[in-house]
Every structure is written in structure tokens, then in C-alpha cells.
Image (cartoon, grey):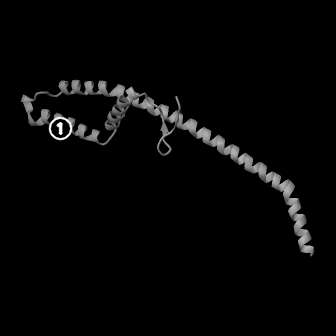
Amino acid sequence: MSVGLGQGTQPHIPVEPSEAYIVVVEDTIANFILMVRMLSFMGVLLTWMAINTWALGRSAFDPYPYILLNLLLSCVAALQAPIIMMSQNRQGEKDRLRADLDYQVNLKNELSITEVLRRLDVLESERLPKLVDDLKVAIEK
């Protein structure tokens, strides 16, 4: 399994074609859960409680302890938790890959800098004295 950079600098983790659709769906759901749209869901919950507490009074379909609402939220949490965990695991894998790629780039840069320093040392030790001697001869003329 080869690992490389996808578009831009984002690590590209190969996924089996049969798993690709599931991965996209899980990530989309996890992103939805964590986005601003979740606030509208919270608004629906607050509206539910307000209607059942004050608007409907004694004829509320889900009075104060909100048992039906509690059941609904428990079901939503039970469905969301595994999806979020799978998405976080994939994100952790991407982070590890990104760290490995950063390490490889840093290592390559370190080797390049070492080579440049070596060449500068050669210039300084071998060619610089010759250049100084040539300048002295040119000045004397």
C-alpha cells in the first residue's frame, strides 16, 4: 500500500474502493455533527421542551421529565458515537502520516544543508586561498 501526498499537502491514505463510499458518508456525518447546523438541532430540542412545558400545559405529549425526548437523544447519541469514533481514528491515521511525511521532508532538508555546508568548507579551504593569492597578484600589477 503506497502512501503519498494527495492534492496540495494533505496526506492521501489509500482506501479500498468498496470502503470509499462508507468513509465519505461517515466523515460527512461526523462533520455535520460538529458543525453549526447542530445548533439548529439544539433549537428544536429547546422548542420541544418549551412547547411541552408552557404551551401545551397539562395536555403535553411529553411532560416535564421529557422521557420521550430523553429516549430520542439517547438513540441519536448511540448512532453518532461510533461514527464520530471512526472519523477520529481516520483523522489520527492522517495525523500520523502527516508527521511521518514531515519527518521525511525534514530529513531530506537536513541532508541538503549538510551537503551545502560541506561544499562551503571545500570552497573555504581550497579555493579561497587561491582566490586571495590571485587578488594579491592582481593588486600588485
Q: Position of residue 90 (x, y in %)?
A: 44, 31
The number of discs equals 1
- Residue at the image point whose x is 73% and y is 46% from the top: 114
Q: Residue furthest left?
A: 59
Rendered image quadrant of residue 51:
top left
| Relative to 124, residue 33 above or below | above
Position of the C terminus by quadrant: bottom right
Q: Position of residue 97 (x, y in %)?
A: 53, 34
| Relative to 10, residue 90 above or below | above
Q: Position of residue 30 (x, y in %)?
A: 35, 34
Q: Residue furthest front?
A: 17
Q: Can see residue 65?
A: no
Question: Badge 1: few (under 14), some or many (20 or more) residues near its Cα, within 10 Å?
Answer: few
Rendered image quadrant of residue 18:
top left
Q: Is residue 72 left or right of residue 120?
A: left
Tell me the kind of residue under disc 1: Thr
- Residue at the image point whose x is 10% and y is 29% from the top: 60
Q: Can see residue 133?
A: yes
Q: Position of residue 108 (x, y in %)?
A: 65, 42
Most foreground residue, 59 or 97? 97
* Secondary element at tag 1: helix
- Residue at the image point whose x is 70% and y is 48% from the top: 113
Q: Is residue 117 left or right of residue 84?
A: right
- Residue at the image point whose x is 26% and y is 24% from the top: 75
Q: Disc 1 designates what residue?
A: 47
